[in-house]
Amino acid sequence: MARISDQHYAIGKKNPNLPFHPAVRAGDYIYVSGQVSKDENGNMMVGSIEEETAGTIEAIQRIIAEEGATLKDVVRVTTYLEDTRDFGRYNAVFKKYFEGCVIARTTVEAKAAICVRVEMEAIVYKPLEP
């Protein structure tokens, strides 16, 4: 794991072909890089907007769980949709996963660098254990 200090380090398995990490801990915050729908082994999963939204959120869950965080600790999500006509279907899935959470969110239409319907990045507030 790449580590700058006890409060600043990488989280998750880094893709050797990419110049960034899945997430970075910086003090009490975890910054999750843009994630797409992946299974537990890191294999991309392609499907409907509902399936890709669920798979993307579950990928985020797995990364932040490494630091003992859950979706209840997420304070902000930015979502990039390939097609905003999918917004209602995406939003219905998002709502199920984040029900009862206090969260800020932005959703925009953007073409991803890879062929996916949805990509999400997140900011998590999870104080470091003393």
Image (spheres, helix red, strand yellow):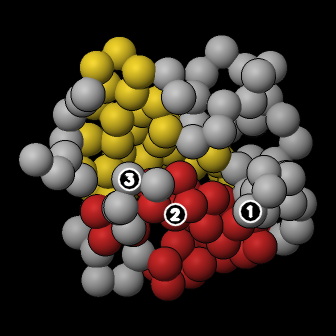
Q: Is residue 125 left or right of residue 41?
A: left
Disc 3 and disc 2: Cα gap in Å?
10 Å
Q: Looking at the picture, tell me which residue is in the foreground, 106 or 46.
A: 46
Asked if the residue at tag 2 contacts the one at tag 3, i.e. Cβ–Cβ closer than 8 Å, the answer is: no
In the rendered image, which quarter is residue 108 located in?
top right
Q: Mark 3 sits on what residue?
A: 67
Cα separation between marks 2 and 1: 11 Å
Q: Which residue is mark 2?
A: 61
Q: Is residue 108 visible?
A: no
The residue under the point 75% across, 35% down is: 112
In primary-sequence order, the first of circles 3 and 1 is 1
Residue occupying the point 26% across, 41% down: 29
Front in this rendered view, residue 90 or 73: 73
**Disc 2 packing (10 Å; few <14; some 14–19; many ≥20):** some
Q: Answer with left or right where residue 6 lies relative to residue 4.
A: left
> In this rendering, which labeled residue sits more in front, label 2 or label 1?
1
Comparing marks 3 and 2, which lies closer to the viewer?
3
Amino acid type shown at disc 3: Glu
Residue named by callout 1:
40
Q: Do we see residue 39 in this rendering?
A: yes
Which element is circle 2 on? Answer: helix
Q: Residue at x 35, y 61 (%)?
A: 69
Q: Is residue 123 above or below residue 113?
A: below
Q: Image point 88% across, 67% down: which residue?
A: 47
Residue 45, x across and y down, in percent: 86, 60
Looking at the picture, how far across and down is residue 109, in whole percent? Answer: 63, 44
Lower sequence index among marks 2 and 1: 1
